[in-house]
Image (cartoon, rainbow, N blue to C red):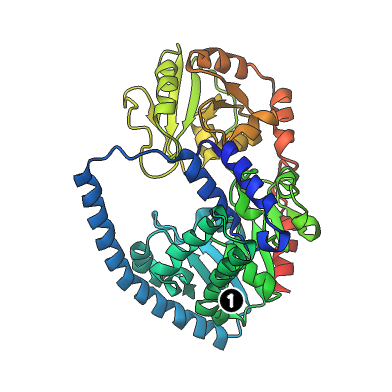
Amino acid sequence: MIEKNLQALEKYNSILESLPDELAKKVDRNALFIRCLEKISKTKSKEFFIVRYVKFLVRIASELRNKFIWKILKIISKRSIKLAQARNISIAHYQIDKFLNKQTFDVRSDYVTELLNQDEILNIIHTTSPQKSLLISHKKVLPVYFEAFLSENDRKNKVKSIDSIFSKFPNALISEILEKDISTFDKKFFSRILFIKKFLFIDDARHTFYLRILSQKRKIETFAYMHGRFNEFHTGLMYPPFNNYLLWSDYYKKFLSINHYYSSTNFFISGPPFLRKKNNYDDSFSPKKNTNILLIGEDNVNPDYIYEYCKELKKIPNSEIFYRPKSDKIEYKFLDKNSYILDNSNSLQESLHKNKIDVVIGTHSTALIESLLYGIPSILLSTPIDYGDHLIRDQVCYLCKSPDKIYETIRQTIKLSKKDIKTLEKRIWSKSYYDYSEIKCFISKLKK
């Protein structure tokens, strides 16, 4: 669960500040932040012994199965590397594997990948499921599953290395431990793709540290593009910096300027990629008696935090509640199917138009800022999660402080004028249009 982020960030900053700069540069900052979060949020397990034992057996069986699958993915990856080298391919692209519908990669990469020739790219892929990746590997051009080159021990050593920072080890020993991890990754994987001259990344803060630190070391120019809203808690983006960064808005520069590492980065501002395709929606006014509310689901939020809000939402007179899950599953199981309309629109823009939404409600979703582009205000529900606090701090959305305030908050929000909503939009979107010329410059520099 994403909560207690601020406490973890304070602990993270304290640790980093205590390390010499050269040692701090060897630290996987996302891994360190997650470890701080785990230590703060750590609770004792209440599971019975038999439940823990069954989970242990399932995990062992899964590891044995995955060990065999990783070997196959490694063979596929080696073949892709050889083909790329033979074709003199000089650009690598880090992407995230996806397994929904016809998607072969994260759909949030589309606004960049649709401008690239996949036959000229070596695809470096992170996967959360080696089994599913294997099943769809034939759909990809030159796929390389870099995690297949690492052993289970390598993954466990990474956790131990981060834990060494919390110990009382001398800095020299910690530096040696971290350097060994980087060297292992270089020897087992990165040294195989040294023919690459430029490295493009979806800006995943979680799994790119070793790829970026070795790109920096080998003088490989790095390019990154935004795939979702980020804030000060995305510590993995802070170092190593990307040489070139395609952002949705100038707003996000402030999070990257927390330290000096991005001072020499070339920034490109694309505007909202959701607006790159013209819509054919009918914007004509049609009177309606109901207030239409769109509730955004999140798969990493404790449903208990939302339960009381949903109870109060059902009581609002003359209203229709539309529920838009984040994935293909219903996150909030407690919802009464008779109390909401499931929204399965292809995009948020389509949902807002089709359902004639008046206000969007959620905890930290990008939908809370995207809706402003279409003239729809948003409300952030107050929960123990502090992940979206910057949206309130920067006065981008309205805050509902407690379930009993939801009706009044909605009533005030839907009274906002177009001018008021535009003011909110400008606080986070420096461009309210998709700047195709800017992304062309970004792609041109990548291909040069």
Q: Name above or below for residue 339 compared with residue 161.
A: above
Residue under circle 1?
Answer: 120
Secondary structure at numbered mark 1: helix
Residue furthest to the right: 264
Residue closer to the observer: 234 or 94: 234
Q: Name above or below for residue 76 compared with residue 310.
A: below
The quadrant of the image that shows the C terminus is: bottom right
Residue closer to the observer: 369 or 9: 9
Residue at point 75% right, 62% down? 441
> Could one spot residue 1 in this view of the protein?
no
> Residue 357, percent across and down?
53, 27
> Residue 444, percent across and down?
73, 68
Query: Badge 1: how crowded within 10 Å, few (<14), some, or many (20+)?
Result: some
Q: Which quarter of the figure has residue 127?
A: bottom left
Relative horizontal placement of residue 100, taking residue 196 as reference (left or right): left
Kind of residue sitting beneath label 1: Glu
The quadrant of the image that shows the N terminus is: top left
> Residue 253, percent across and down?
74, 47
> Could one spot residue 373 in this view of the protein?
yes
Q: Which quarter of the figure has residue 243?
A: bottom right
The total of numbered circles placed on residues is: 1
Relative horizontal placement of residue 319, taking residue 253 as reference (left or right): left
Q: Name above or below for residue 187 compared with residue 236.
A: below
> Residue 415, percent across and down?
63, 16
Residue at point 39% right, 74% down? 73
Residue closer to the observer: 82 or 358: 82
Relative horizontal placement of residue 276, taking residue 301 as reference (left or right): right
Residue furthest to the left: 50
Residue at point 19% right, 46% down? 50
Residue at point 36% right, 42% down? 329
